[in-house]
Image (spheres, rainbow, N blue to C red):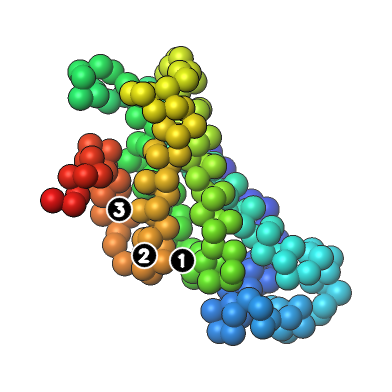
Amino acid sequence: MATVTGKRNTQTEAKIKAAFTTLVQDKGFDAITVSDLARTAGINRGTFYMHYLDKFDLRRQLIDDAIDDLTGLLLDNADEDGRVMSRAGKSVCDAFQTRAIAAALRYVKNDYAFFDAVSNSGNDMQMYDRFKEVLKKLIMTQAKRFGATPQSTYNGIPADYAMEILVSAVSSIIWLWIRRGCQESPDEICLIIEKNKVTAPIDILW
């Protein structure tokens, strides 16, 4: 499998991304200009505009690239026969497998400075929502591999709400991890996600 990192980035784009990350951390997204980005990247403004329309287009494309990479990692590392036993003793599809989630978490941790910059660039909720869509895609892909039949409700909960409950829990754990500086290892976060699968929210309160 080809590596996901660097498959699109030219050397110039990598320099611009590094400049974006540094400048957003130093002075905030609102304060940076294209001139700042070009100067920090060691290029001229014309070269910048050959790749991006403005700083907003740059941020959008960087987020798109990160989401594409995470999607690839999650789908490529998902076991095609990922099954677990439910509480009812039935064999069910486990969309959020440890191997796939761990691969995504390692990607985030290895590029933490960028994700930290994005989360502080005034666009953090877009990244959060995009990541939820990636997890939904993973669930649907795994369900199709497993041959699961779509239902209108799950344990009495309408399908749309059930999906939101499932992906929001995992997304929130990962997003909090990023906002806290990725202090824990990917394996520790995977363990939290695994425990979350079998822990009712009310149990956490007592």
Percent position of residue 8, x then y: 68, 53
Residue 38 falls in image quadrant: bottom right
Q: Is residue 199 visible?
A: yes
Percent position of residue 72, x then y: 54, 41
* Disc number placed over residue 86 in the picture, else none: none
Residue nearest the observer in this picture, 59 or 133: 133
Say which element carries label 1: helix
Which residue in the structure is indicated by mark 1? Answer: 112
Task: Identify the residue at image location x=28%, y=18%.
Answer: 91
Q: Amino acid at mark 1?
A: Tyr
Which residue in the structure is indicated by mark 3? Answer: 189
Say which element carries label 3: helix
Q: How many marks?
A: 3
Percent position of residue 3, x then y: 55, 47
Which residue in the structure is indicated by mark 2? Answer: 182
| Chain-order first, disc 3 or disc 2 | 2
Q: Residues within 10 Å of mark 1 (few under 14, many from 20)?
A: some
Residue 92 falls in image quadrant: top left
Q: Amino acid at mark 2?
A: Cys
Q: Is residue 42 visible?
A: no
Q: Residues within 10 Å of mark 3 (few under 14, many from 20)?
A: many
In the image: residue 178, left or right of residue 15: left
Q: Is residue 109 above or below residue 4?
A: below
| Chain-order first, disc 1 or disc 3 | 1
Q: Amino acid at mark 3?
A: Ile
Q: Nearer the viewer, mark 1 or mark 3?
A: 3
Circles 2 and 1 in contact, beta carbons < 8 Å? yes
Task: Identify the residue at image location x=30%, y=59%.
Answer: 185
| Chain-order first, disc 2 or disc 1 | 1
